[in-house]
Each structure stands twice: as structure tokens, then as C-alpha cells.
């Protein structure tokens, strides 16, 4: 029987290879006329703008989460963080 330790990297490599082949196939396709290229550029610009806004929100969330975890772990030798962790595990386990 194949161990999962060997199977996971193999499957990951195959997924990356598939993504590379898809990328190459898409790049070989005809981009279309000038109007289609213009629309594609507008969509790409909109996607980049959305991702920038999304990453700003994500950065704020991560920073706030780090501060809360630091605060909870620094008081009472991590007692608060331990209690929060236990509550999360309780609700995740059902």
C-alpha cells in the first residue's frame, strides 16, 4: 500500500503539471478582435482592483487577529487563549 506521505507530493505535482498544461493551452488560444481584447483588459483591471481592496480588508483582519491572540496569550500565562481554544474545539467537534 502506498503511504500518504508519498502520495500527497505526487498528487500535488500532478495538479501543478495539469495547471501548467492548461495555462499553455489557454495562452495558445486566439485572443479575439480588438473589442474582445479591450473587454478582457477591463475585466483584468477590475479584478486587480477588487483584489487590492480585498487584501486591505484581509490585512486589517489578520493584524487585529494577531493583536487579540497576543493579548490573550500574554495575560494570565495564556489562560484566556487556552479557554478560547477549548471553546472553539468544543463547537467544532459538535
Image (cartoon, grey):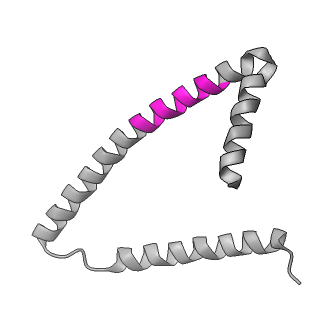
Per the rendered image, the range of residues in magenta is 56-69
Q: Residue furthest left?
A: 35
Query: Measuring 89% from the left and 84% from the top, which residue is drawn there?
Result: 1
Q: Please, is residue 53 above or below residue 1 in the view?
A: above
Query: Measuring 57% from the left and 30% from the top, which residue is drawn there?
Result: 65
Q: Position of residue 26 (x, y in %)?
A: 37, 76
Residue in the foreground of this view, choosing between 59 and 61: 61
Query: Measuring 72% from the left and 46% from the top, which residue is drawn there?
Result: 89
Q: Please, is residue 73 above or below residue 52 in the view?
A: above
- Name which quarter of the figure residue 66 lies in: top right
Q: Residue furthest right?
A: 1
Q: Position of residue 53 (x, y in %)?
A: 33, 39
**Left/right of residue 75 with respect to residue 16 in the rendered view:** right
**Left/right of residue 51 with respect to residue 23 in the rendered view:** left
Q: Please, is residue 7 above or below residue 93 in the view?
A: below
Query: Measuring 74% from the left and 69% from the top, which residue is drawn there?
Result: 9
Amino acid at each position: 500500500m502506498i503511504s500518504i506521505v508519498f502520495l500527497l507530493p505526487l498528487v500535488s505535482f500532478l495538479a501543478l503539471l495539469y495547471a501548467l498544461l492548461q495555462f499553455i493551452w489557454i495562452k495558445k488560444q486566439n485572443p479575439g478582435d480588438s473589442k474582445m481584447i479591450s473587454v478582457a483588459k477591463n475585466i483584468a483591471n477590475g479584478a486587480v482592483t477588487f483584489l487590492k481592496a480585498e487584501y486591505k480588508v484581509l490585512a486589517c483582519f489578520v493584524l487585529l487577529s494577531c493583536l487579540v491572540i497576543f493579548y490573550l496569550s500574554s495575560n494570565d500565562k495564556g489562560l484566556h487563549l487556552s479557554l478560547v481554544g477549548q471553546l472553539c474545539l468544543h463547537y467544532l467537534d459538535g
